[in-house]
Image (cartoon, rainbow, N blue to C red):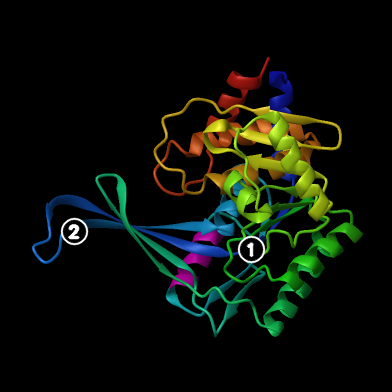
Amino acid sequence: MIDTAAIDRLFDTYNQTKIGVVGDIMLDTYWWGNVDRISPEAPVPVVALQKKELRVGGAANVALNLRALGAPTTLFAMIGKDAEGAELKSLLEKEGINTKYIQTSTTRVTTNKVRVMGRNQQMMRLDHEHTNDLITKEEDELIANFMEYVQQEKPALIILEDYNKGVLTERVIETILAFCKTHDVPTAVDPKQKNFLAYKGCTLFKPNLKEVKEGLKVQVDTVDLANLNKVHAALQKSLAHEISFITLSEHGVYFATKSEQQLIPTHIRNISDVSGAGDTVIAVASLTYAATKDMSLAAEIANIAGGLVCELVGTAPIDKKQLHTEVVNLIGK
């Protein structure tokens, strides 16, 4: 429990907590329409399109959630030299996110996920993307930009947001983690399977349960504290990291530090869409941990935030006022 005055101070502190985000950014395109008949050409629904909506996804959605909470946020990422890249960068700049270090590639396209929505649900998704690793020249530029940023801005924490699209190569990961350790900057990682065990020595490692099972090749038959503690021990053996933070879908979240392990149950919600919930969770947990160094509090608030965004359709940032109200109601005193 935390008193209301302390919650108020924490939410104010977010505004001065600088965070850098490195990873795969993407454009989320939504085509909304009505479905009232089946196509005569094939047994598929006909969607009568009514509007097109552009949102940001991947690491860009993590940055958007950080900005929604007030944090000064800088992105390190790659876009293509295309209309989608220009639209994505424009959306980020409108939200006050620092896009100075977003690189443009002539050999890649901007990742664009097109979702066709009918009757308030997803009918189809079309992905346009390149997932090959950055070339050496692009890695060099990203690393140089990152080092300049850390030395000049002295961020409170760095988030590495991996969507397996090629920005977080083994070299980029290793170099960034080593540089952050040298400069006493904590790091939080949201991994994917390809480089799952490459994030050695990070501060906070945040997979979901499915990613843990695949990454460690283990079975977790029952989601309880004993089994999750075993998972944490296995992760630490491979990564030598400080904190495990595992999202468990309907079971809530689990975290483990050197001195504390806790399974925090989810709060009952009307779930509409889980898209982007992981982005919100890593953003809120990382920002709160950077501001407080209290992982228990960070996990509690991130758990609440993840539930809130699942009530919305599509990727959407957390609402700071709504989150504040929920935190006061659910864990305040």
**For this rendering, which residue is in front, 140 or 278?**
278
Q: Amino acid at mark 2?
A: Val
In this rendering, does residue 190 appear at all?
no
**Residue occupied by mark 1:** 23
- The numbered mark at residue 44 is 2
Badge 2: residue crowd in 10 Å (few <14, some 14–19, many ≥20): few
Q: In which quadrant is the C terminus drawn?
A: top right
86 vs 333, left or right, is left
Considering only vertical position in the picture, is 155 above or below 172?
Answer: above
Q: Which residue is located at x 73 percent, y 70 percent?
A: 170
Q: Amino acid at mark 1?
A: Gly
Q: Which residue is located at x 74 percent, y 46 percent?
A: 17
50 vs 294, left or right, is left
Image quadrant of residue 248? top right
Q: Which residue is located at x 51 percent, y 49 percent?
A: 276
206 vs 37, left or right, is right
